Image: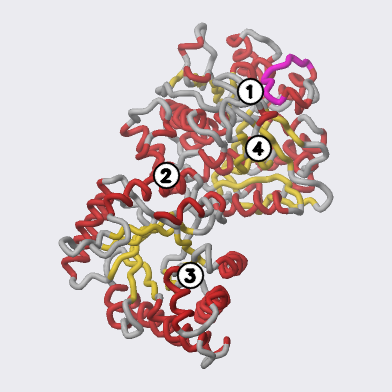
Amino acid sequence: MSSPRLDVIAIGRSSVDLYGQQIGGRLEDMASFSKAVGGCPANIAIGTARLGLRSGLITRVGDEHMGRFIREQLAREGVAVDGVRTDPDRLTALVLLGVSDDHTFPLIFMRENCADWALDEGDIDEDFVASAAAIVVTGTHFARANAAAAQMKAIRIAKAHGRKVAFDVDYRPNLWGLAGHGAGEERYVRSETVTQHLQAILPHCDLVVGTEEELHIAAGTEDTLEALRIVRRLAPDALIVCKRGPMGCVAFPGAIPADIEQGVRGPGFPVEVYNVLGAGDAFMSGFLRGWLRDEPIETCCAFANAGGAFAVSRLLCSPESPTFEEMRHFLDHGSPHRALRRDVALNHIHHATTRRAAPPSLCILSIDHGPHDLEPVARNLGADPARIPRFKQLALAACLTVSGGAPGYGVFLDGALGRKALFEAEAKGIWTARQFPHGEQTAFADSPLEWPVGQVVKLIANARSDARTPLSERLREIAQAMAVCKAGRRETLIEALPAESEDTAQLLARLYAEGLKPDYWLLEAAGDAALWAAIDRVIGEQDPWCRGVVVIARSAASGPEIAAAAAMPRVIGFVGGRAIFGDALAGWLKGELDDDAAITAMAGRFGALAQAFDAGRQA
């Protein structure tokens, strides 16, 4: 029998969850929502991938924007999407959710004739199912005959190939037709019909996981110990796990004891409950991480309880699932906060280990200079400043010309004169950092939360004597901007310019001491290897998750300097600004260069620096 290429495949629901952002309000009064991939199996697929398992998903999505979002996000998370089918006739499921208080979490399932409900046996590919060491079937998808048949086919294939079957009872009464549309929050309604359905599944299972209420519906009794005994009779060889909320969980690998407390347990983690939705999926992901790695049951329980603790302490489902690095840090060091979402160290690891993929190297053309920089240039040359936005589009075209469609090229742009160029850069999918306005400009600027999520937010920490605002005054503004960016899952880049009395390594140490941990640093090229070593040491000690350093090209003749910097630790790119576009801008504004000539001039200078950087990296 061949070794599986995947660890686990989850089967069933996938939706777009829209979470109300006004905590403590009624769902009726929500004014804004955060979007995330949802649905128990999709959450488990993402949660296990974040914990280091090779996961996949079998589901259906609609042939529209939300369906593409689910597919693309699964791929970004490392989930195999071979089993994700696009349904041309149905829409992707939506779920609206809110947090009214510590115990009330209203939700509406918008699943009428949705894509994942149409899952059928034709969606179950034997080779794909057999490629995983285990499958996860979920209770809700046994509520429809076609979806139940699909999951049963997957079970038969898994068993035929010697694979394991894990069953998440995942009981949602209103999705079984037992409660109204407004009762999405309801977790238990007794039903002999549901019990009969679920009991037909249990004999095939190697792992059964459910809350006490879910074990009650599976067994047909509200007595938890009796329910466990019934499940044991029906699933004689399965590991049974009972989830008990803040009390953690209890696992039963063999006979059910006289006291539920005599089962196998792992450490529990008392945390503040912020939102219980999705906690079970993070719990299951953690348990599977241990179970499929043959860890002791106590360790499986610890992973599961920790996953649930992270989930209940944060708002969303799949985006909040911990990575294994984050979970390991929590298990090793704990947290001083009952509200884990307030733990700065954990939040930074979470941010750094769930970022979107980025190019390993960056060649950047900077033209984010604002009106106060470029409009006087136009006036001095007798040109209309209103032409400058068009020139920024030409600079973007020069960058694209040099890139030839290859990754690793980008631009710095602003939202004032560079608005149209920003739209074009986003459409082209090019790496983009956007200048964050500061000082008096901030009050009139868009919030980074209004920017496309892939745009990196550029901030300036200028400690020089010629800075418009002293760094001591800017630090609070920078810290506030970074907090907003991290809350909105935006990456940041800080341009750090040291004072005349300090070097770059000293300034970085000072900024780290203020709690500033950007994804990228933008620095001047250091003059000697000792300073580069000091920079490398500071970053390594303070933030090993930093993506790297981008160096500034000071002139068009900076090729040798850029090549030398490219070989230094943590240097991943360079940026050139006026050195690349300055002469072209003047010639174009004076009418000496047309659009094509301006693009060619900029591309020539930018391309030469890119070649020097590449040569330095190769050397």
Q: How far apart are marks 4 and 3 (CA)?
A: 35 Å
Q: Distance between the residues labelled 1 and 3?
A: 56 Å
Mark 1, mark 3: which one is toward the viewer?
3
Q: Name the residue under label 3.
A: 410
| Visible residue check, residue 3 | no
Q: Residue furthest bottom?
A: 592
Q: Is label 4 in contact with label 3 (beta carbons under 8 Å)?
A: no
Q: Is the magenta stretch mostly helix, strand or loop?
A: loop
533, 515: nearer the viewer = 515
Seen at 31% across and 33% down, the residue is: 333
Residue located 56% across and 73% down the image: 389
The residue tagged 1 is 235
The amino acid marked with disc number 1 is Ala
Picture coordinates of residue 198 (x, y %)? 72, 24
Amino acid type of the residue tagged 3 in the rendering: Gly
Label 2 – label 1 distance at C-alpha: 49 Å
Tell me the residue at 41%/30% (across/down): 299
Q: Which amino acid does label 2 sit on?
A: Ala
- Tag 1–tag 3 contact (CB < 8 Å): no
> How would you rate the neighbour count of disc 4 (Cα within 10 Å): few for under 14, some for 14-19, many for 20 or more?
many
Camera-near label (2 vs 1) is: 2
Disc number placed over residue 121 in the picture, else none? none
Label 1 or label 4, whichever comes before in sequence order: 4
User: In the figure, 604 relative to 115: above or below?
Assistant: below
Q: Which of marks 4 and 2 is in front?
A: 2
In terms of image quadrants, where is residue 162? top right
The amino acid sitting under disc 4 is Gly
Magenta stretch: give its range: 184-192
Q: How is the image coloured?
A: secondary structure
Element at label 2: helix
